[in-house]
Image (cartoon, rainbow, N blue to C red):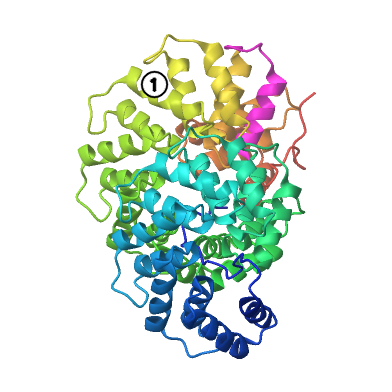
Amino acid sequence: MTIKFSTTFLYAVVASAISVPAYADFDKALSDYKKGDYKTAFNEFLDTGMQGDARAQAVLGQMYSDGEGTPQNSQEALNWFLKSAAQGNADAQTHLGLMYAQGYGVPQSNQKGFEWLRKAAEQGNADAEYNIGLMYSQGLGVSQNFEEAVNWFRKAAGQGNAGAQYSLALMFTNGSGVLQDYQEAASWYRKAAEQGYADAQTNLGNLYQNGRGVSQNYQEALNWYRKAAEQGSAIAENNIGSMYYDGQGVSQNYQEALNWLRKAAEKGNAEAERNIGSMYRNGQGVPQNYREAVDWLQKAAGQAQVNAQNSLGQLYFYGQGVPRNYNEALSWFRKAAGQGDADAEKNLGIMYRDGNGVPQNYEEALRWFRKAAGQGSAAAQFCLGEMFDHGSGVPQNYPEAANWYRQAAEQGDADAQTNLAILYDDGRGVPQNYQEAANWYRQAAEQGDALAQSNLGFMYLKGQGVPENDSVAVLWFRKAAEQGHGVAQYDLGVLYNSGQAVRQDKVIAYTLFNLASATGDESAIHSKSQLANELTTAQVEEGQTLSSAWNVGTPLPTKSRTWRARR
């Protein structure tokens, strides 16, 4: 499931807790304000402000801005802030800076906003310092300068400003203006998180979940995510859902995962929409429903969620939940590939290679496969290996095929492991080496690759690269045969026919030859015909019955009813 950092910078909202000396009229007004008697407080501040008290003028500006004790009036707010700011009041200067930056009651101007904030910041106003840092980080009203942003964030963070602490942590997370340092990021996230800053709580949870800058601790991750979720953080809700989905710090519970993901999705969180779509696509916690999957993935894709775009392309490619439409698939793959998604790049390569929705174009396929492979996509590396192995659109080049197969195989791609083993088995593109072949066959076989299981069985039968061991050969032949692999069914049949490493049973041999014949195996067809001449009608009929009753993925019969070995 997808986990996402919260990265949005927001302008600070300046609080009204203004520190003032003890002037009786101002103190009385402030006391009434704190009691929630805004109307009385407004009139008292108005009297004091009209006498020229800069502090009262600043509070009046805020009350007009927020509509507390008086109708909201941005022009009046501006007038009172200007009066107060002219006397050097840092809070008023900060408010003016934000009004210009946001275009609230004045023509929007980042430059004027920056000028007012700078005046306040030079007086040590933490909110102004924080917002100056934001403007440097985004290049608003000034040239973008991450080092300057870090400098101002540090000033404000040192005064306990939670937004600045969070923003400074982001800079360390991303390595913007400072060297990337997750440990330092965790320290600043924690300071902001302990003040109740939801985005910091979410990102601190993320560091604990992934063990970056702190020891990995799923319980701590959940603890911080829950704190943020209690404040309505959609990202935290999505991340909690993901942890229930994966069983991290909690017992895996698809239903609970879905509950949290829905909370986040209701707030428009694209990651959650994509994750719900995936659950409907795979039938996890809900009945499999491709149509429902399409609906959720379209919501996420509409927000440019890259994995949702790629998944939609796959659904259109296979006609799941929507009519098969290669043009639509191509369109969604292109959108995702445009964001650098390696899987989408690989999928575009497949469409050009196979001519699905586009004219077959090996050169274009090669280009997209290389893009994805360059990002480490094992599937794309495997596809490149196949193109060089078979000479599809490129000159046949076994060493190059081996190179790409190896890159994918080392990432655990079973198909690549099998094909690399075949090159070692045959000595194509690499020196013939049965031990290396057996090693790669084994890795793929343990992942359930039927061809690798069959070939590994043959190597044990012949003692190539491994000690000769007929019993182990039978084990691997059986695993592959039970997956419907025709060659393995034939080889296992040969052993039953001769009684090598198994109890001889020619009816079982006939059964296996019959199954292998259905896959088109010529040797099996010939052996079945020969063996039928040795068996009685009842034995042939039993072999046919056993093969008809067998289903792929189920155990093969090991003993027949009618076979009796001659003494």
For the residue labelled by badge 1, is the local secondary structure a helix, a strand or a loop? Answer: helix
Mark 1 burial class by Cα count in 10 Å: few <14, some 14-19, many 20+: some
Which residue shows up at 53% across the image and 66% down it?
Answer: 14
Horizontal side of residue 38 vs 317, given as left or right:
right
Which residue shows up at 59% across the image and 35% down it?
Answer: 489
- Quadrant, the C terminus: top right
Hey, which quadrant is residue 500 in on the image?
Answer: top right
487 and 413: which one is in front?
413
Q: Is residue 263 above or below residue 74?
A: above
Horizontal side of residue 558 vs 436, given as left or right:
right
Which residue shows up at 23% across the image and 39% down it?
Answer: 362
Horizontal side of residue 214 vs 348, given as left or right:
right
Q: In the rendering, at what x and y percent does residue 460 appear?
A: 63, 18
Q: In the rendering, at what x and y percent does residue 173 appear?
A: 52, 41
Q: Which residue is mark 1?
A: 403
- Most frequent secondary structure within the magenta stretch: helix
**Residue 141 at least partly seen:** yes
Q: In the rendering, at what x and y percent does residue 321 appear?
A: 45, 69
User: Which amino acid, mark 1?
Assistant: Asn
532 and 395: which one is in front?
395
Span shown in magenta: 463-482
Q: Is residue 393 above or below residue 309?
A: above
